[in-house]
Image (cartoon, helix red, strand yellow):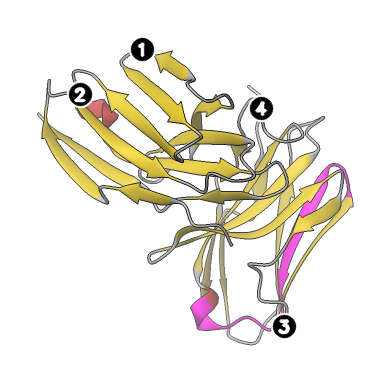
Amino acid sequence: DARVTQTPRDKVTEMGQEVTMRCQPILGHNTVFWYRQTMMQGLELLAYFRNRAPLDDSGMPKDRFSAEMPDATLATLKIQPSEPRDSAVYFCASGWDRGDYGYTFGSGTRLTVV
Amino acid sequence: ILNVEQSPQSLHVQEGDSTNFTCSFPSSNFYALHWYRWETAKSPEALFVMTLNGDEKKKGRISATLNTKEGYSYLYIKGSQPEDSATYLCAFSTGNQFYFGTGTSLTVIP
């Protein structure tokens, strides 16, 4: 089965450190999302790319978060500097265009900022 | 940020019971409505993608309907089983925006 691969699986870091999370979408998928799982808001959209161009990053705190797709096989989400309130599970998902066949999620990165 | 609402927030049913829950979404700029199943400690998995008003989709004991004019979708589970216990998420797509509801958490009691 084709998979969306996220690394690292778990990350513990100290407050103030830079954190980089990586996502390898399914080969050929041209749409990539980053979501954050929170208790209050469920799956919170952070960024949405199609053909490597950002479509919607209105939900992402711009002062410390950044999302990029340096190429079609890699999406990154960076937090600098990290804060304890950033502790959450971060999911990446990929699919074709506007998702007529649904989107496939990665296993998530569990981030803990202490 | 678009408002996608799901109800109820949580649900407990007995094994064998049938159940249903609701997803409400904006009726304008509609492209598609997705349903996902999310088991604890796993990742969401796509169940259905519906695009046409009046669409009905079925997978085993789970089915879904769509009303784009009034902005709602129903998910039905017939004869619930303990393995159906999960959070069921809907997501609304305009084609260029994609937002999840907060989900309905289903627990099926053996």
Q: Please give the range of residues in magenta.
A: A71-85
Residue placed under numbered mark 1 in the picture: B60
Say the numbered circle drawn on residue A63: 3
Q: Residue at x 56, y 57 (%)?
A: B2
Mark 4 or 2: in front is 4
In the rendered image, residues at marks 3 and 2 fall on the same chain: no
Residue placed under numbered mark 2 in the picture: B80
Q: Amino acid at mark 3?
A: Asp
Q: Is residue B74 above or below residue A61?
A: above
- Residue B97 x, y percent position in the rendering: 67, 50
Quadrant assignment for the N terminus of chain B:
bottom right
In the rendered image, residues at marks 1 and 4 fall on the same chain: no
**Mark 4 Cα-neighbour bin, 10 Å: few <14, some 14–19, many ≥20:** some
Q: Is residue A82 magenta?
A: yes
Q: Residue at x 66, y 69 (%)?
A: A60
Q: Amino acid at mark 2?
A: Ser
User: Label 2 is found on which chain of the structure?
Assistant: B
Spatial CA distance of label 4 from label 3 is 33 Å
Quadrant assignment for the C terminus of chain B:
top left
Residue placed under numbered mark 4 in the picture: A100
Q: Secondary structure at mark 2?
A: loop
